[in-house]
Amino acid sequence: MSAKSILHVMTRPSSPETAAEYNRWYEDVHMPEVLALDGFVSARRYGPTKDGDPYVAVYEIEGDAKAAVKRLNTAMGDGTVALSDTIQMDPPPQMHVFELIKEIAD
């Protein structure tokens, strides 16, 4: 069985006026581009329930998470994964990788 990890990303729209375009870009462009990269197998997105809190995207990674994130960073750098000016860059998005240590299912 290959290792399971997640990439947890917190982002915000660049302004309240760009929120609708930011959400469209994130769901219709960004998430599919990330999922096209080797290692990324699913994505979920969560919206804030309180003003000022970030949006959260959770990408499930199969295999080598460090290699998958390296591919993502390369793809963002070369334009394979498009970035948008509707995403807040100051402060920048926060990205964290977590490895599965325990799973309990019904």
Image (cartoon, rainbow, N blue to C red):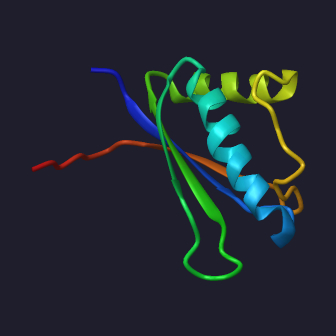
Residue 41 is at least partly visible in this image: yes
Foreground pick, 17 / 38 = 17
Quarter residue 7 falls in: top right
Query: Residue, x 15% and y 48% (percent of image)?
Result: 105
Foreground pick, 28 / 53 = 28
Q: Position of residue 27 (x, y in %)?
A: 62, 44
Residue 93 is at least partly visible in this image: no
Please state if 3 lies on the left or on the right of 93 as rendered.
Answer: left
Against 41, is 23 above or below?
Answer: below
The furthest residue to the top: 38
Query: Residue, x 23% and y 46% (percent of image)?
Result: 103
Please state if 89 lies on the left or on the right of 58 as rendered.
Answer: right
Please state if 43 lies on the left or on the right of 56 as rendered.
Answer: left
The furthest residue to the left: 106
Please state if 19 lies on the left or on the right of 59 as rendered.
Answer: right
Against 106, is 69 above or below?
Answer: above
Against 43, is 37 above or below?
Answer: above
Query: Residue, x 69% and y 54% (percent of image)?
Result: 23
Against 91, is 75 above or below?
Answer: above
Task: Tally the marks.
Answer: 0
Q: Position of residue 75 (x, y in %)?
A: 76, 23
Query: Residue, x 44% and y 37% (percent of image)?
Result: 5
In the rendered image, which quarter contains the N terminus? top left
Q: Position of residue 64 (x, y in %)?
A: 49, 23
Q: Position of residue 33 (x, y in %)?
A: 66, 28
